[in-house]
Image (tube, helix red, strand yellow):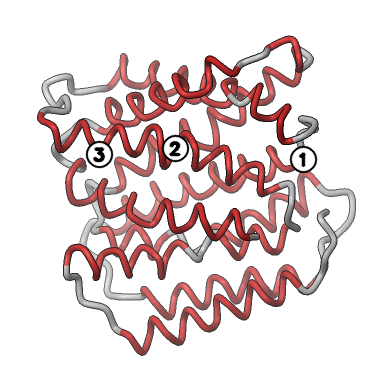
């Protein structure tokens, strides 16, 4: 669990950085492709393709294409319609998607009722923290975020269920994850990008370097490895811990107003959800 907590802290600033400095300034297709290319460059020197059967290599590349390739394409475009806080709000259904996908598609038996309850509590806690009157463009933004949530949820569950050996072995094949993501986002960029909106200046390139090497490269390796260490209920509930973390970053660095009562109450509900899921030590 400590890995998931650490990555949550690592990702907390990403929403704000995208919303404050990249959305509307750098074309979303270009920004996502640069992130994936940087993350791929980080793992290519470690790639040992012969350590994984060909079918598993294709599966891992496919997971990367779905979990972060398509997901980020949808997410970045959602920022054109929503504020950072609204994006955070609309991610609250991810725990339910994770639980539902694992139960109906990837699991041979029903998940414990406790894990379903934990997922529902995670959604409730996040809603308490971040439910506000949506903006006029909320429907388009909402649908984009739900598509992103489904991709991220499916990718996490698929990675958890894919046999990849030890954590050291995963490190040596993780380049495939970003090969899939880079191919997907590269094709989308070639077809749809507005190349007049390329990154300019030290600030935008610095943010992209951080997002590519840190948040994406190291972050997704750690997060996906951690999915194999926890049960589905823990994984589902931890997906919503990013919401209070992201709001705290917004407050600390950009002075965004925070309803501390709602934040405290919602965070308490989220912690209850994590505790409830963690009571069952099974990893299935």
Figure check: 184 above or below 116: above
* Upstream in sequence: badge 3 or badge 1: 1
Image quadrant assignment for residue 100? bottom right
Vertical side of 228 occupied by 262: above or below = below
Of residue 70 and residue 19, the one placed in the foreground of this image is 19
Q: Earlier in the sequence, mark 2 or mark 1?
A: 1
- How far is mark 2 from mark 1, CA to CA? 21 Å
Q: Where is residue 32 drawn, in percent x and y? A: 34, 31
Q: Residue furthest right?
A: 109
Secondary structure at badge 2 equals helix
Structural crowding at the residue carrying mark 3, measured as other residues with C-alpha within 10 Å and reported as few (<14), some (14–19) or many (≥20): some
Is label 2 in contact with label 1 (beta carbons under 8 Å)?
no
Q: In this figure, which residue is indicated by the disc labeled 1?
A: 161
Q: Which residue is mark 3?
A: 207
Q: Which residue is mark 2?
A: 216
For residue 233, side relative to residue 36 (left or right) = right
> Local crowd at mark 1 within 10 Å, few (<14), some, or many (≥20)?
some
What residue appears at the point 18 percent right and 35 percent down from the top-left corner? 204
């Amino acid at each position: 669990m400590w890995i998931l907590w650490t990555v949550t802290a690592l990702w907390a600033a990403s929403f704000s950085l995208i919303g404050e400095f990249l959305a509307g300034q750098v074309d979303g297709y270009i920004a996502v492709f640069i992130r994936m290319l940087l993350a791929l460059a980080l793992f290519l020197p470690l790639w040992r393709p012969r350590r994984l059967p060909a079918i598993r290599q294709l599966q891992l590349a496919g997971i990367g294409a779905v979990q972060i390739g398509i997901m980020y394409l949808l997410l970045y475009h959602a920022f054109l319609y929503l504020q950072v806080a609204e994006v955070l709000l609309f991610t609250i259904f991810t725990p339910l998607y994770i639980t539902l996908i694992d139960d109906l598609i990837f699991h041979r038996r029903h998940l414990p009722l406790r894990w379903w309850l934990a997922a529902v509590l995670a959604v409730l806690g996040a809603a308490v923290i971040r439910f506000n009157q949506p903006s006029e463009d909320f429907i388009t933004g909402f649908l984009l975020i739900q598509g992103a949530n489904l991709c991220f949820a499916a990718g996490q569950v698929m990675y958890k269920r894919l046999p990849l050996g030890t954590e050291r072995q995963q490190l040596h094949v993780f380049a495939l994850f970003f090969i899939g993501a880079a191919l997907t986002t590269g094709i989308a960029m070639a077809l749809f990008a507005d190349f007049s909106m390329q990154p300019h200046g030290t600030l935008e390139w610095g943010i992209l370097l951080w997002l590519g090497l840190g948040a994406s490269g190291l972050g997704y390796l750690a997060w996906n490895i951690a999915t194999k260490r926890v049960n589905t209920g823990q994984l589902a509930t931890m997906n919503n811990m990013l919401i209070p973390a992201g709001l705290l970053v917004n407050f600390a660095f950009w002075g965004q107003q925070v309803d501390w009562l709602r934040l405290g109450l919602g965070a308490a509900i989220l912690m209850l959800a994590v505790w409830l899921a963690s009571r069952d030590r099974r990893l299935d």
